[in-house]
Amino acid sequence: MKATELRELTTEELHQKRGDFREDLFRLRMRKAVAQVENPIRLRQIRRDIARVETILREREGNQDRGPEEAG
């Protein structure tokens, strides 16, 4: 997913997406262990999607911690 698409989601939806991505990554790693991965590039894509979601969540947490005079 693109970062712009992820930024449109609510915080709760982002947490759900992160969980879904982690489940997908786990399944792909298990398949890789028994050499049944059709698309090994998908592992990298999922890891990057997880990183994007976590980055956006951290940005949102940082903005909540700032006071109104610092938010600019």
Image (spheres, helix red, strand yellow):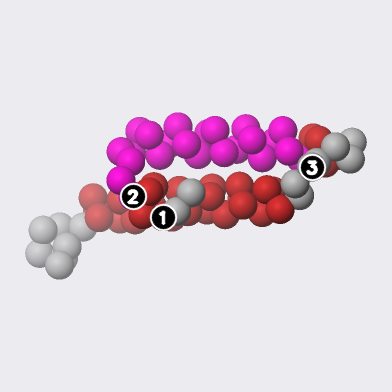
Of residues 42 and 13, the one drawn nearer to the viewer in this rendering:
42
Say which residue appears at 57% left-offset and 38% top-offset. 21
Cα distance, mark 2 to mark 3? 30 Å
Q: What is the three-letter code of the residue carrying label 3?
A: Glu
Which mark sits nearer the N-terminus, 1 or 3?
Answer: 1
Q: Which residues are magenta?
A: 7-29
Which residue is most to the right?
34
**Does residue 54 appear in this view?**
no
Say which residue appears at 79% left-offset and 42% top-offset. 38
The residue carrying mark 1 is 3
Cβ–Cβ below 8 Å for labels 1 and 2? yes
- Mark 3 neighbour density, 10 Å: few (under 14) some (14–19) many (20 or more): few
Query: Is residue 29 toward the left or the right of residue 6 in the image?
Result: right
Residue 47 in the magenta stretch? The answer is no
Disc 1 versus disc 3: nearer the observer: 3
Q: Secondary structure at mark 2?
A: helix
Say which residue appears at 15% left-offset and 57% top-offset. 67
The percent coordinates of residue 9 (x first, y second) are: 33, 41
Which mark sits nearer the N-terminus, 2 or 3?
Answer: 2
* Dominant secondary structure, magenta: helix
Say which residue appears at 53% left-offset and 50% top-offset. 49
Q: Secondary structure at mark 3?
A: loop
Q: What is the three-letter code of the residue carrying label 2?
A: Arg
The residue carrying mark 2 is 7
* Quadrant in which residue 11 is drawn: top left
| Disc marking residue 38 | 3
- Mark 1 neighbour density, 10 Å: few (under 14) some (14–19) many (20 or more): few
